[in-house]
């Protein structure tokens, strides 16, 4: 029976085995990193998919009118305004179209704080509101069929280009799958 090169202690044989083991370890590490990265993407995609599923219309654009605040129920404020669509992410509207929207939010304080009671930097009209809810401000809106935000917390989002790109990718993928 012939003795193996490793058993005889030849340095080339030890190097060959070490290189194979190193290559295998590198492949396993790259595969693991790839899976971990995809798992993170899937989690984030699930969140965006959920809000897309709640919405009939998702648009990027700008408020083109002054808002009007209404308290139709205790603890919930409705701000109505006209919104010009710059880009349709999901739904049946056209870019350039202006629609009436109703942005719902929970309000932790009264609808309109008395003038002397505002905190520094607080919006002059409605406390605890995102800066995107005013004339000229750009944002992403997640809307129901009637133009009301589909979610009280997530219905209005800052206009992050990465979010717009991800939302479009998800909508395109869903369309390809027939969803």
Image: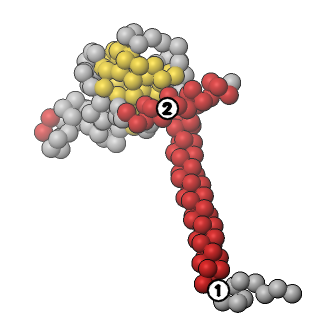
Q: Residue at x 57, y 46 (%)?
A: 42
Nearer to the camera, 101 or 74: 101
Displayed quadrant of residue 126: top left
Q: Residue at x 55, y 32 (%)?
A: 170
| Colour mapping | secondary structure
Q: Is residue 177 above or below residue 107?
A: above
Q: Residue at x 68, y 24 (%)?
A: 178
- The x and y percentages for residue 161 are 37, 33
- The x and y percentages for residue 40 are 53, 51
**Mark 1 secondary-structure assignment:** loop
Q: On the image, numbered disc 1 is attached to which residue? A: 10
Q: Residue at x 63, y 67 (%)?
A: 24
- The x and y percentages for residue 18 are 60, 76
Nearer to the camera, 45 or 8: 8
Q: Is residue 79 left or right of residue 144?
A: left
Q: Nearer the viewer, mark 2 or mark 1?
A: 1
The quadrant of the picture occupied by the N terminus is: bottom right
- The x and y percentages for residue 80 are 35, 20
Nearer to the camera, 177 or 64: 177
């Amino acid at each position: 029976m012939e003795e193996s090169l490793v058993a005889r202690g030849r340095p080339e044989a030890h190097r060959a085995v070490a290189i194979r083991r190193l290559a295998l370890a590198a492949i396993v590490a790259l595969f693991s990193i790839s899976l971990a990265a995809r798992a993170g993407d899937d989690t984030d995609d699930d969140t965006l998919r959920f809000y897309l599923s709640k919405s009939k219309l998702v648009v990027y654009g700008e408020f083109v009118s002054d808002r009007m605040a209404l308290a139709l129920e205790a603890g919930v404020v409705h701000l109505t305004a006209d919104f010009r669509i710059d880009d349709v992410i999901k739904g049946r509207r056209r870019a350039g179209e202006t629609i009436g929207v109703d942005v719902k939010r929970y309000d932790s304080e009264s609808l309109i704080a008395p003038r002397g009671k505002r905190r520094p930097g607080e919006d002059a009209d409605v406390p605890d509101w995102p800066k995107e809810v005013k004339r000229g401000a750009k944002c992403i809106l997640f809307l129901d069929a009637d133009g009301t935000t589909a979610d009280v917390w997530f219905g209005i989002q800052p206009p992050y280009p990465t979010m717009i790109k991800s939302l479009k990718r998800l909508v395109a993928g869903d369309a390809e799958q027939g969803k």
